[in-house]
Structure formats: C-alpha cells, structure tokens
Amino acid sequence: MTEIIRSLTALRARIRDWRRTGAVIGVVPTMGALHEGHLSLVRAAQAECDRVIVTLFVNPRQFNSPEDFAKYPRTEEADAAILAPLAADVLFVPDATEVYPPDHATVISVSGVSEPLEGAHRPGHFDGVATVVTLLFNMTQADRAYFGEKDWQQLQVVRRLVADLKLPIQIVPCPVMRAPDGLALSSRNQRLSDAARAQAAVIPKVLFDAVEQIGGGADRALVLDAARRRLTDAGLGPVEYLALCDAQTLGNAQPGRPARLLVAVWLDGVRLIDNVAV
C-alpha cells in the first residue's frame, strides 16, 4: 500500500528508517494527472531501487501563464488510485508552502541548454523547473531520479544541473510512452476534445516521417519546411518550433553527433510537445 505523506518532517523520518537498512531510494517527480507514462517511470524505479517515492506537486514557478496553471489537471484522488496497484512506497504530496515558504528567496538557473526552444517561448520556465527539481532532490534525498524522454529539453537541463552542482543523484532517462496511434502520453492530452485528440495523432506521424527522410539523405531544411506545412494543413497551429537539434546541447545538430527532432504546437487551446531521435 502506498503511504501518502504531505510534510517534509514526516518524509524525512521515513527516509531515515530506510537508510538504516541501506535502502537505495528512487524518486519519480510528477505534477500529477498520472498516466501510463508516469507508471512506466515508477516501474523502472521499482526494478532498480529498494524504495520508491512518487512526488505530486503542481509547481507554480514553471508556468508562464496563470491561466495555464489554473487549468492544469489536479486529480490527487484519481492519481492515488492509479498508483495503488504498483504499491510505490510513498506518494509525497506537499502543499505550496511546504516547498516554497513565504521567505523562499533562491532560484536555480541553468544557462545554455535551457535557452532555445522551450526557453525561448516560455521565459523563466526552466528556472522554475531547476529550482523545484533541486528542492525535490534534497527533500527526498533520493539516489536515483526517473524522467521521461518526452520532455527532452527538461531532461537535458536536469542532467546539466546535477553535473554542475555535483548532486549525489543519478538521472535515469526512460523512453517516451505512446498511445496506439503514436501520440506521446501527456497529462495535457486530457484537455483535448475528442476531435482534437484524433487530430493530434498527426504529430508523431510527421516527426517519424521527417526522421526517415533525413536518415535517407534528404535536405534537412526542405524536410522541416514540409513537416511544418503538414502540421498546419492538418489543422494544428501555431507551430512554435520544429527543430533538429544536438541531442545534448540543444544547439544546431552537427554531423556525427546524436540529434533530436523536437516540436511544440498548439491544438484546441492546448500546447503539445514531442520529440524523436534522429
């Protein structure tokens, strides 16, 4: 049975008990609205760790729009029910003042990898991500943290953060989980109408087709232009970015280095992101 803990004091007491037995602790940070993608992270953590903490905190500091923050799904009861069959050890559900007391004055900023793509379109977003991730790592004192590759740029920001601050935690990436039609699983998908949800399936099709063409030697700029038109012709838009980037630095893709094709596009008032390896 998963224990729900809301205070740092209670969480730290549980962690002390685990540490006495030499347990390896894994953490799966989430903002709730759990789906199979999140559960895959929990399973990965359970396969490698003795104890697993799932955090549930809708972080206000990574939202650029108060409206977007207000609309973000908050489904704690349903999340606990979804998580129950996996029997994670702890669901940590702190309130905002537990994470950010009124006198909280510290912001963590990661330069470079945070600046293009999401960083350019959502100023301050990754400062909020880096700050809350650092706090959750310290609060949970975990040995390993599990992140999905759907938020590829976030994963690279967190890796950079951990390396630069010499944090004693291993970042474990996990593959993108997709619906049968290929759409990357996301909590934001819940906000799509049925018609828009059907439309959204074009996103992965466009990405995988573009990667196949690039792999076959087609001109990259022409492929990306055609992919953008295909998205807009399917009724999606605006397309905030569709970019072929270096997989680690998120700068321009370079020959001989791993690359990633990333997209952010609006549909039905919902902003969707996805990425695939090139």
Image (spheres, rainbow, N blue to C red):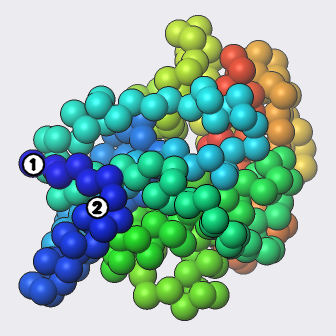
Q: Is residue 265 left or right of residue 90?
A: right
Q: Residues within 10 Å of mark 1 (few under 14, many from 20)?
A: few
Q: Quadrant of residue 265?
A: top right
Q: Earlier in the sequence, mark 2 or mark 1?
A: 1
Tag 1 secondary structure: loop
The residue depicted at 23 percent of the width and 57 percent of the height is 90
Rendered location of residue 131, percent (x, y): 62, 67
Instruction: Confirm whether residue 82 shows in the render.
Output: no
Q: Is residue 266 left or right of residue 194?
A: right
Position of residue 53 relative to residue 60, above or below, is: below
Asked whether 91 or 237 is in front, the reply is 91
Instruction: Confirm whether residue 184 shows in the render.
Output: yes
The residue depicted at 57 percent of the width and 18 percent of the height is 192
Q: Residue lying farthest top?
A: 195
Rendered location of residue 23, percent (x, y): 16, 80
Disc assigned to residue 88: none
Position of residue 24 relative to residue 271, above or below, is: below
Q: Amino acid at mark 1?
A: Met
Rendered location of residue 6, percent (x, y): 32, 53
Asked whether 232 or 112 is in front, the reply is 112
Q: Quadrant of residue 250?
A: bottom right
Quarter of the image with the C terminus in it: bottom right
Q: Residues within 10 Å of mark 2 (few under 14, many from 20)?
A: many
Instruction: Please give the residue where the numbered disc 1 appears in the rendered image.
Output: 1
Rendered location of residue 274, percent (x, y): 62, 44
Asked whether 12 or 102 is in front, the reply is 102
Disc assigned to residue 53: 2
